[in-house]
Amino acid sequence: MKQNTPIRDYEAAEFLDTDEMIYTYISDVLQDGTETEIKTALANVVKAKNITEIAKKMGLKREELAKVLFEKEDLQFTIVQRLLNAMNIKLNVVAV
């Protein structure tokens, strides 16, 4: 009898391995995502880019940034701005 291979948890951060992939991912989620989806996407990008390094650029400790991203707190827009700046990502406004 053939043994089943266990399925491992999906980790989106593993697939965010280029700046282009990260920009496309963030752009798509910001365009159509809920607050929860946006927070999850930002957390995935931070994991892909190195949470300790991003926290330093924001003037935070790693634990402080992790608390903001991974706990059930509302994500303030000022934090989103600082986070995007630390990752060298700019928001652009486009008329639709």
Image (spheres, helix red, strand yellow):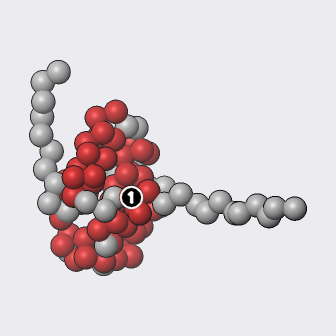
Which residue is rendered at x = 36% and y = 46% of the image? 38
Q: Which element type, helix, strand or loop, lies under badge 1?
A: helix
Q: Is residue 45 visible?
A: yes
- Amino acid found under the numbered disc labelled 1: Phe
Which residue is rendered at x = 30% and y = 77% of the image? 52
The residue that disc 1 covers is 15
The spot of residue 93 in percent (x, y) is: 12, 34
* Between 23 and 63, the one nearer to me in the picture: 23
Q: Is residue 5 left or right of residue 85?
A: right
The spot of residue 60 in percent (x, y) is: 26, 74
Local packing at callout 1 (Cα closer than 10 Å; few below 14, some 14-19, many 20+) is few
Dividing the picture into quadrants, the one containing residue 64 is bottom left
The spot of residue 4 in percent (x, y) is: 76, 61
The extreme top residue here reads: 96
* Quadrant the N terminus occupies: bottom right
Q: Count all numbered tags in the image, as a single digit.
A: 1
Which residue is rendered at x = 48% and y = 60% of the image? 11
The extreme front residue here reads: 1
Which residue is rendered at x = 71% and y = 63% of the image? 5
On screen, residue 61 above or below 70: below
